[in-house]
Image (cartoon, helix red, strand yellow):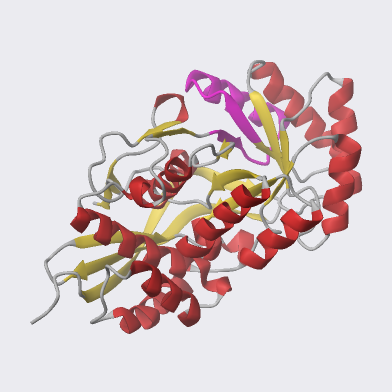
C-alpha cells in the first residue's frame, strides 16, 4: 500500500509567453519568456507546481535543457516520500549540478508546494513564517535616458518606492539615465545593478558622477566581475555604498567566502540560480554572518516569483526584494497571488502551498 505522501508522477511542459517589452541587462536581453511548468503529484492526489525560467543572458541556461534535466532528475524521486523533503532536495543537488539551477528550482518548488498543500500550511511557514507580506522594487532596464524617465514615471504611478536601475553603458551615460529616474520619481530609493558589465573603477566613476548631481544609491549590485572579490571590497571601501553579490554568489561556499572576506554586505538569493535548498541555506549563512539578504529572480511568472516571495516572507527582515518581472509579461499564465499595488506581495490569504497555479 502506498504512503499518501509518496511521489507518484512528475511532469514538465514548456510554455512560450510573450513580453510587452524586452528585459535588457548588461549581458543581453530577452524579448519573450520560455518557461517550464512542472507538476508533481503525490499518492493521495495532492499536486504541487514549480517553474524553471532560465535567463540565457544571465548564465546560458535554456528552457529545453531545463525540461530535459527535470524529466531525468525527477525519475529519482518516483516512489520516494515527499515528507522527507530535505532529503529529497539533497538528492536533487546530487543529481543536478549547480549550473542546472532552474531545473533544481522547478523540482524543489513543486515538491515543497505539494508537501505544504498536503500539510495545509502556506509555504512561507516552512521557511520560518516571519511575515505574510513583502514589498518589491521595480526595475528600469537598459535603454535611453528618455526611456528611463518614462519607466520611472510608470513606476511612480504604481506606488512603488524602490527602483532598481540596470547599468552597463559608460559611466557618464548611465549617470544621465539614473538622473532621469531620480527626476521622474524624486522620493524613490535607488539601487544599481551592473550584472558584471562594469569593473570597480567604472562603478566608482558612476558614483562620482551621481554625487555631483546629489544622488546617492542605497545599494550597488555586482559592481565588479564575479570572481573579483578585491574589486568588490575596494568599491565598497571607496564609495561607502553597500555591495550586493549576485553573480558572485553561486552557492554555499561563495556565501561563506563573501562573508569571511567582507566582499559583500548583501547576498542576493535567487531560486533559479541555485535551487531552493541552496538559496535557503545561503540566506541562513547571511543571517549568521551579519549580512543583509536580498531575494530576487530572473524573468519569471508569478508562480516562481510567488515562491520567492514566500522565501522572503518566511525569512523576514529581507532588506531588498526584487520580484517584479511579471510586469514584463504580456499575459499572465497563472492564477493566484502576484505583484500587487505598491509592489506588495500579500501572502496573508494563502492557506496552503504557494497560492499560485498555472492556467
Q: Nearer the viewer, residue 185 or 22?
A: 185
Magenta part of the chain: 137-164
Residue at image coords 78%, 26%: 216
Where does the image place residue 90, in percent across and percent down from the top left? 45, 74
Where does the image place residue 162, in percent across and percent down from the top left? 59, 28
Image check: 140 left or right of 271?
Answer: right
Residue at image coords 71%, 38%: 192
Magenta segment includes 328: no
Residue 105 visible here: yes
Residue at image coords 89%, 22%: 212
Image check: 317 left or right of 183?
Answer: left
Check the image and report above or below for 6 versus 325. Answer: below
Check the image and report above or below for 201 versus 186. Answer: below
Check the image and report above or below for 162 versus 206. Answer: above
Magenta segment includes 145: yes
Residue 251 visible here: no
Image check: 207 left or right of 351?
Answer: right
Check the image and report above or below for 330 versus 83. Answer: above
Residue at image coords 41%, 47%: 128
Kindly give the residue lying farthest to the left in the view shown.
Answer: 1
Amino acid at each position: 500500500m502506498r504512503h499518501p505522501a509518496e511521489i507518484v508522477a512528475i511532469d514538465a511542459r514548456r510554455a512560450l509567453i510573450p513580453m510587452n517589452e524586452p528585459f535588457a541587462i548588461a549581458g543581453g536581453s530577452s524579448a519573450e519568456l520560455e518557461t517550464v511548468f512542472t507538476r508533481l503529484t503525490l499518492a493521495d492526489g495532492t499536486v504541487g507546481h514549480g517553474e524553471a525560467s532560465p535567463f540565457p543572458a544571465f548564465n546560458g541556461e535554456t528552457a529545453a535543457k531545463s525540461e530535459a534535466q527535470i524529466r531525468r532528475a525527477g525519475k529519482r524521486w518516483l516512489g520516494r516520500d515527499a515528507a522527507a523533503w530535505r532529503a529529497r532536495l539533497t538528492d536533487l543537488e546530487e543529481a543536478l549540478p549547480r549550473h542546472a539551477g532552474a531545473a533544481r528550482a522547478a523540482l524543489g518548488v513543486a515538491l515543497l508546494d505539494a508537501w505544504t498543500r498536503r500539510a495545509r500550511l502556506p509555504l512561507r511557514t516552512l521557511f520560518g513564517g516571519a511575515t505574510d507580506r513583502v514589498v518589491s522594487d521595480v526595475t528600469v532596464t537598459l535603454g535611453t535616458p528618455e526611456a528611463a524617465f518614462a519607466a520611472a514615471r510608470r513606476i511612480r504611478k504604481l506606488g512603488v518606492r524602490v527602483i532598481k536601475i540596470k547599468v552597463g553603458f559608460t559611466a557618464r551615460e548611465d549617470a544621465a539615465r539614473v538622473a532621469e529616474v531620480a527626476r521622474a520619481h524624486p522620493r524613490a530609493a535607488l539601487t544599481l545593478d551592473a550584472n558584471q558589465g562594469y569593473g570597480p573603477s567604472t562603478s566608482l566613476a558612476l558614483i562620482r558622477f551621481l554625487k555631483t548631481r546629489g544622488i546617492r544609491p542605497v545599494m550597488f549590485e555586482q559592481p565588479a566581475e564575479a570572481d573579483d572579490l578585491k574589486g568588490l571590497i575596494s568599491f565598497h571601501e571607496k564609495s561607502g555604498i553597500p555591495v550586493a553579490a549576485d553573480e558572485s554568489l553561486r552557492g554555499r561556499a561563495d556565501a561563506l567566502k563573501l562573508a569571511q572576506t567582507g566582499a559583500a554586505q548583501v547576498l542576493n538569493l535567487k531560486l533559479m540560480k541555485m535551487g531552493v535548498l541552496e538559496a535557503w541555506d545561503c540566506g541562513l549563512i547571511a543571517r549568521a554572518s551579519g549580512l543583509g539578504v536580498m531575494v530576487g529572480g530572473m524573468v519569471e511568472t508569478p508562480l516562481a516569483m510567488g515562491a520567492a516571495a514566500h522565501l522572503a516572507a518566511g525569512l523576514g527582515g529581507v532588506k531588498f526584494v526584487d520580484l517584479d518581472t511579471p510586469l514584463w509579461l504580456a499575459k499572465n499564465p497563472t492564477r493566484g497571488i502576484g505583484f500587487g499595488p505598491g509592489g506588495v506581495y500579500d501572502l496573508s490569504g494563502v492557506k496552503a502551498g504557494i497560492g499560485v497555479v498555472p492556467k
